[in-house]
Amino acid sequence: MAERYPRILVIDDELGIREGCRRVLTPLGYAVEVAENGAEGLRKVREWNPDLVLLDVMMPDITGIDLLEPIHAHDPDIVCIIITGYATVELAVQAVKRGAYDFISKPFSADALILAVHQGLERRRLVLESKRMQALEAQARELARAKEELERLDKMKSAFMLTVAHELRAPVAAIQGYLRLILDGYADPAKQREMLERSDQRASELLALIEDLLALARVKDAAPQDKRVPVPVGDVLKQVADLLQVEAAKKRIAFSVHADANPTVLATRDHIRQLWTNLISNAIRYTPEGGSVSVSLAVRGDKVEGAVEDTGIGISQEDLPHIFDEFYRTRTAKEMVSGGTGLGLPIVKRIVETYGGNIGVESEVGKGSRFTFTLPLYTEPQPEKALDAAGQADAAAS
Ligand code: ADP
C-alpha cells in the first residue's frame, strides 16, 4: 500500500512529549505513532517503517544513542532527531556524531519541533532522491554497456555475412562463367568437357562450403544438454582413422594412432567424429608426400586429451593467432591445397568449447604442427545406495 503521508515515530517515556508531538504534527498531515520505551520503539521502527524518529535521549530501558544503531541497521536512511534536556547537550552532540541528524532541547516550542521535522524530512527526501539517481545512473551505464556489446556483435555478424556472401559468390560466378561460354557458343567443343568438369569441381567446393557453414551454425543448437550422451572417444577415433588411412596411404604418409584408453565424454557422436575428422584430414592435407601423421588419445586426471601431430608445412607465428578465425587460410596452405573452406578449425574450436574443453596448437614452418584438445572426462555416476543394497542382497543370498 502506498504511503502518502510522512511517518513520524516519537519514542519518549514522557507522556506529555509524546502527546504534545502528536497534537502538533498530526494536523500538518504527518502520520504519527508513539512508543514509551526503547524496546517498543524499536519494534515499531521494524514494523511500521517510519521516515523520521523523534528519540528521547534518556529512557529507563535504554539511551536514545544506543537505539541509533539498531534503527539504522533496519533502514540507514531513517532520520533520527534526538530530544534532550538542557543538561545533556553534550550527549546530544555525541548522538549526532553517531548518526543522529539533529537534536532539539526540552522544553521546545511547536515551531521548533515543526522546523526540525520539516528539515529532517527534507534531508531524507534528498538522500533517497540521490540514491535513486545513483541507481538510475548505474542502470544507464549498464544499458549503454549492453548496447555497445550488441552493436559490436551486430558488426561482427554483418562482417561475417559479407564474407560468407563473398565466399559463396566466387564459385557460383565461376560456374556461371563456364556455362555462359558454352551456351553462347564461345567454347570450343573440345574444351567443353573440361569446362564442365571444372564447373563440377567448383560446385563440389560450393557444397563443401555450405556443409561447413551449416555445421558451424549448428554446433551450439545441436548440443543442448538433453541431447548429450556418453560418447566413447577412442571408438570414434578408430572409425575416422580407418576412413582417413586411405587418404594418407595415397600420399605415402606414415599414419599412426596411439590410444591407451577409450574414454567417454558427454557430447554428440557427430561432433566428436567431426572434431577428429577435421584435425586429422588437415594434418594429411598439409603434409607433403612421404611425411608422417600421428594421432594420440589419453586420459589425464579428469580430462580427455587428444593430439594430432604432423610433419607438414607448419604455420608461421604471424598466422597462428588467426587460424581459428572463420575463412582464414594461410598463403602456403592455399598454394598447397585448393578448395579449402577455412571453416574446419573454427568448427573444431566451437565444438571443443561447447563441451567445456580447450584447443591448442604449436607449429613451426616447414617442420610440422601439433594440435591438441582437451574435453572433460565423463564418468558414469555411481548410485552408491543401490550398490550397497545390491551388495547386501548378494551377501544374504550366498
Ligand atoms: P581449411 O583447411 O579448409 O583451409 P581450416 O579451418 O581447417 O580450413 O584451417 C585453417 C587454416 O589453418 C588452413 O588453411 C591452414 O592454413 C592452417 N592449418 C590447419 N591445419 C594445419 C596443419 N595441420 N598444418 C598446417 N597448417 C594448417
Image (tube, helix red, strand yellow):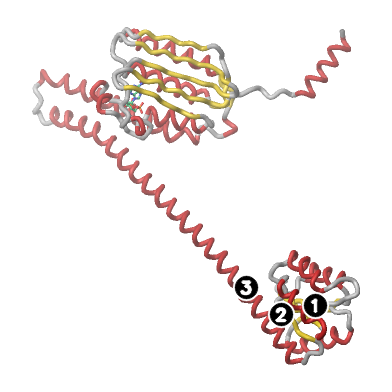
Marking on residue 12 = none
Of the pair 5 and 166, the residue shown nearer to us: 5
- 13 vs 367: above or below: below
Circle 3: is it few (<14), some (14-19), or many (20+) Cα within 10 Å?
few
Residue at 10% across, 18% down: 190
- 20 vs 143: above or below: below
The amino acid type found where label 1 is placed reads Leu
Number of the front mark, 3 or 1: 1
Marking on residue 127 = 3
Residue under label 1: 55
Q: Is mark 3 within 8 Å of ligand 1?
A: no
Which picture quadrant has residue 59?
bottom right
Number of the front mark, 2 or 3: 2
Tag 1 secondary structure = strand
Of the pair 103 and 234, the residue shown nearer to us: 103
In 3D space, how far apart are the residues under numbered discs 2 and 3 (Cα atoms)? 15 Å
